[in-house]
Image: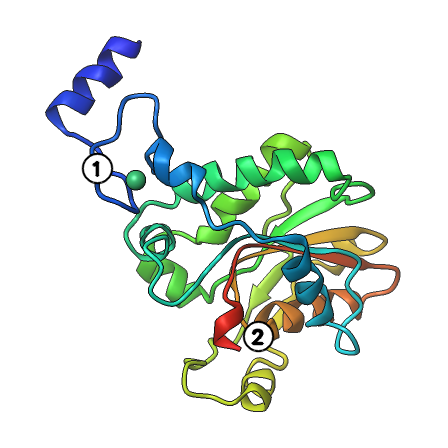
Amino acid sequence: MKWISDLIDLILPRYCAVCGTILSPNEQDLCLNCLCRLPRIDSIRMQEIEKLFWGIVPVERAASYIYYQKGSPYNNLLHKIKYKNHPEAATHLATSAAHELQESGFFEGIDAIIALPLSKKKERKRGYNQCDYIAKGLSAVSKIPVLKGCVERTKANETQTHKSREERWKNVEGIFTIANPDALQGKHILLIDDVLTTGATIASCAKSITALPDTRVSLFTLAYSYNKI
Ligand SMILES: [Zn+2]
């Protein structure tokens, strides 16, 4: 029913999340121009991401898709995903990322995908967990199932913004609880978060999972904010 979406676009135009121009019916979230200029993570930064976890938690593979740079107009897109009720944009981006990850063999041997949970209170307030939408895009391409309800965030961590690197790592210790260890045991889990900064939060969750016998963890985040470290 292409004519219906064309008509809706005419009555209720959609705008590019980055530059604000009106989107054509075949564009999603971003105009073609902004999509081509998506600030992608290069291979050097990708290695930097893996190094964040060295000596802290054993991580098989770690990847991210786009940079989160201070002042970048692309932050609008991440803001829309997280706070403005447009989590479907996370699925679209994750789907694009997944096609490339699939080619590189990133998904090989991974048994299940888990989205980093929000605290129940936070998810109720926001109405959704943006990480679920990232997991959905990765699962659609890789055909790896998403496991729900196996990990819970039992403590809501305070804001990390004004904390030192050491304080951030301490602040998130033990905030996740494994609700269903039997479902995870013996598995290689791909853990998902939206934005990677110090890596403290996702590492805390990875630690809880790898504490179970015979489990392995890989990580994927939609964005990487290297300038915040
Ligand atoms: Zn644009």
Q: Residue at x 58, y 72 (%)?
A: 201
Q: Residue at x 61, y 67 (%)?
A: 202
The response on whether ligand 1 sits within 8 Å of label 1 is yes
Q: In this rendered view, identify the residue nearer to me: 86 or 67.
A: 67
Reading the image, the residue beneath label 2 is 198
Q: Residue at x 51, y 90 (%)?
A: 164
Q: Residues within 10 Å of mark 1 (few under 14, many from 20)?
A: few
Residue 5 placement: quadrant: top left
Q: In this rendered view, identify the residue nearer to me: 66 or 219.
A: 66
Mark sitting earlier along the chain (1/2): 1
Reading the image, the residue beneath label 1 is 21
Q: Amino acid at mark 2?
A: Thr
Residue 144: tell me if it is visible.
no
* Vertical side of 196 occupied by 130: above or below: above
Identity of the residue furthest to the right in this view: 214
Quadrant position of ligand 1: top left
* Vertical side of 27 occupied by 57: above or below: below
- Which label belongs to residue 218? none
- In the displayed structure, does residue 202 sit left or right of residue 61? left
Q: Amino acid at mark 1?
A: Thr
Q: In this rendered view, identify the residue nearer to me: 228 or 175.
A: 228
